[in-house]
Amino acid sequence: GNSVTQMEGPVTLSEEAFLTINCTYTATGYPSLFWYVQYPGEGLQLLLKATKADDKGSNKGFEATYRKETTSFHLEKGSVQVSDSAVYFCALPSGSARQLTFGSGTQLTVLP
Amino acid sequence: GAVVSQHPSRVICKSGTSVKIECRSLDFQATTMFWYRQFPKQSLMLMATSNEGSKATYEQGVEKDKFLINHASLTLSTLTVTSAHPEDSSFYICSAKGLAGGISHNEQFFGPGTRLTVL
């Protein structure tokens, strides 16, 4: 089945630093790819998505490009803020019900 | 975007009791709901998939008699943890997808989660 491999954390950065969280996938065909964010004690929120190869998803300064050549969907942000501290999950649909399969999650802490 | 609520947000119970968690889609018809479990500092693990009006499909290793799922309507699914034990303590998250404005959507919308602590 489809799967994702996500960069292990935790990641600690200073405010305004550049962020990259790596995500690679294994899939049949070209499924949509997602990044979700989970703030402390909360559920998941969709951060961004891309539905086909070469698409770039973006939201709140975060970007990720669907690259079929490298089967990757790395998350980037040019200048992180303290409020970006959260756990980030890469995900893609799999199975007959198209349920989401999640990466292991990457804990990001941004220090002032 | 579509909203999914969960109730309760936190529950503490004694070992041996049963706990029911509700998941509601507030502004769309959830034809499919998913229940996930998340251990501290870990990813989400799918427990089961439920379609409205039919029996839930459980993932391998998930006891269906332990985790009862009911999806009786297009806006409500419940997860009942029966005879809870401390090892059932976890963060349970539901998600839903379905129809909004008559259009089928593949995107899943997540509830805020329920923190279960079994003493």
Image (cartoon, rainbow, N blue to C red):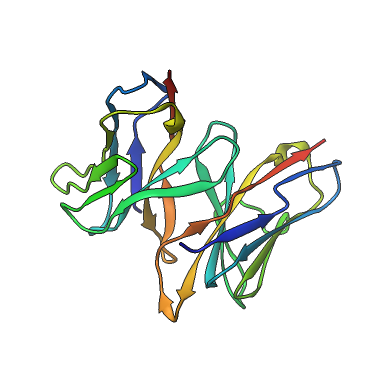
* Relative vertical location of residue B8 with respect to residue A24 in this rendering, above or below: below
Residue positioned most to the left: A69
Q: How many marks?
A: 0
Query: Is residue B100 toward the left or the right of residue B114 in the image?
Result: left
Specify whether residue B45 is in view: yes
* Relative vertical location of residue A12 with respect to residue B29 in this rendering, above or below: above
Q: Which residue is located at x 63 percent, y 64 percent?
A: B24
Residue positioned most to the bottom: B102
Image location (x, y in percent) of residue B110: 52, 55
Image location (x, y in percent) of residue A84: 42, 32
Of the pair A54 and B70, the residue shown nearer to us = A54
Image location (x, y in percent) of residue B1: 45, 62
Q: Quadrant of the N terminus of chain A?
A: bottom left
Q: In which quarter of the image is the C terminus of chain A?
A: top left
Q: In which quarter of the image is residue B33?
A: bottom right
Q: Which residue is located at x 73 percent, y 54 percent?
A: B66
* Relative vertical location of residue A102 with respect to residue B99 in this rendering, above or below: above
Of the pair B73 and A69, the residue shown nearer to us = B73
Image location (x, y in percent) of residue A2: 34, 52
